[in-house]
């Protein structure tokens, strides 16, 4: 029970990586604030399932990561429900694929808000609580796209490179408080986020679905395998351990070798 009596807020945890991280932390005893969009009944089932499966408390925040005040309110609500926030995982994210000269303005702005600005607001709200406790873990789900670019993903790559800068800066600011701030940089993980970008990538590159899967997606990963959400959850759990107390400001890759090339 590595995280017994800890409280974690995981944004974007109604699906994919965030859901696996929330469940992974709950399995180690943490109380969890989940967050994300989706069908209310399905979310309630997930919330109640975490409590039942792991014997922890789990609350849901409907905060929209587009809105800074709602992000701040989510952290405050977690502190009110559970006493404090020890671990913050800034994970919510969306993707949109289009050439720069056709990129819709509203999509670009939404990606910057959800994938970058929300992490700023949540971190700003959580750091005073962590400083007070003398312990904290901030984990940003970045991407291989925080380190390298791919065509047609200007907004996403800009936001993820921004997250890299935020991660390193926050790490330096909180270094003397036993708070670490790191980014996990996955390659392709099979989640709805990846599945949804296939039709647009087919259009942007003039390819079939199979060509996109093999020549674009898995072409980037020398292992020719998708990273799994469970592997990301295990990585996040490691970053919360005492063994990882001196890892901070790091871009932790888990990309099947993508950025080694
Ligand atoms: P996903 O689509 O399965 O999950 C995204 C989550 O974010 C969902 O819970 C969704 O409800 C939530 N979300 C989206 N918009 C939101 C909003 N406005 N307000 C609140 N919540 C919102 O995607 P995923 O693949 O699990 O992605 C999670 C993170 O991992 C993202 O930051 C993504 O960029 C990053 N990532 C994913 C991959 C991949 O290959 N899947 C690779 C690298 C990085």
Image (cartoon, rainbow, N blue to C red):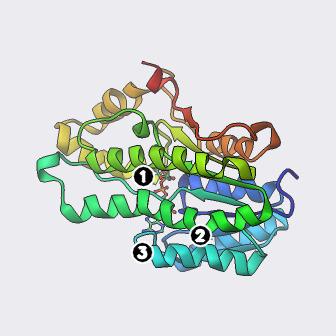
Alpha carbon distance from label 1 to label 2: 27 Å
Mark 1 or mark 2, which is nearer to you? 2
User: At x 60% / y 51%, what residue is drawn?
Assistant: 173
Taking depth in this image into account, of 246 and 175 the one nearest to the observer is: 175
Q: Quadrant of residue 52?
A: bottom right
Alpha carbon distance from label 2 to label 3: 14 Å
Q: Quadrant of residue 29?
A: bottom right
User: At x 18% / y 45%, what residue is drawn?
Assistant: 203
Count of marks overlaid on the render: 3
- Residue 161 location, x and y as percent? 40, 43
Q: Secondary structure at mark 3?
A: loop
Query: Is 221 drawn above or below residue 186 in the view shown?
Result: above
Q: Which disc, if any, is residue 121? A: none
Q: Is residue 118 visible?
A: yes
Q: Secondary structure at mark 1?
A: helix
Q: Is ligand 1 closer than 8 angstroms to the Cβ of mark 1?
A: yes
Tell me: 212 left or right of 16: left
Q: Earlier in the sequence, mark 1 or mark 2?
A: 2
Mark 2 or mark 3, which is nearer to you? 2
* Disc 3: which residue: 67
* Disc 1: which residue: 193
* For the residues bearing labels 1 and 2, Cβ distance under 8 angstroms: no
Taking depth in this image into account, of 176 and 65 the one nearest to the observer is: 176
Q: Earlier in the sequence, mark 3 or mark 1?
A: 3
* For the residues bearing labels 2 and 3, Cβ distance under 8 angstroms: no
Query: Is 130 drawn above or below residue 259 in the view shown?
Result: below
User: At x 39% / y 57%, what residue is drawn?
Assistant: 94
Q: Secondary structure at mark 2?
A: helix
* Disc 2: which residue: 125
């Amino acid at each position: 029970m590595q995280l017994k009596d800890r409280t974690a807020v995981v944004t974007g945890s109604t699906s994919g990586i965030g859901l696996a991280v929330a469940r992974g932390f709950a399995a180690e005893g943490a109380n969890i604030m989940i967050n994300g969009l989706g069908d209310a009944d399905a979310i309630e089932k997930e919330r109640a399932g975490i409590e039942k499966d792991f014997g922890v408390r789990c609350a849901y925040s409907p905060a929209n990561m587009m809105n800074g005040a709602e992000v701040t309110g989510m952290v405050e609500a977690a502190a009110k429900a559970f006493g404090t926030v020890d671990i913050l995982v800034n994970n919510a994210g969306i993707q949109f694929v289009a050439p720069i000269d056709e990129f819709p303005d509203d999509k670009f702005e939404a990606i910057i808000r959800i994938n970058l600005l929300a992490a700023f607001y949540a971190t700003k709200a959580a750091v005073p609580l962590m400083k007070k406790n003398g312990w904290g873990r901030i984990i940003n789900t970045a991407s291989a796209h925080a380190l390298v670019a791919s065509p047609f993903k200007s907004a996403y790559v800009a936001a993820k490179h921004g997250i890299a800068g935020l991660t390193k800066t926050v790490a330096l600011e909180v270094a003397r408080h036993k708070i670490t701030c790191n980014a996990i940089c996955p390659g392709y993980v099979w989640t709805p986020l990846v599945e949804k970008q296939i039709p647009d990538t087919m259009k942007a590159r003039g390819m079939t679905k199979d060509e996109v899967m093999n020549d674009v997606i898995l072409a980037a990963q020398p292992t020719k395998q998708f990273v799994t959400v469970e592997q990301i959850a295990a990585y996040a759990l490691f970053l919360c351990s005492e063994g990882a107390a001196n890892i901070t400001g790091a871009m932790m890759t888990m990309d099947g070798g993508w950025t080694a090339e």
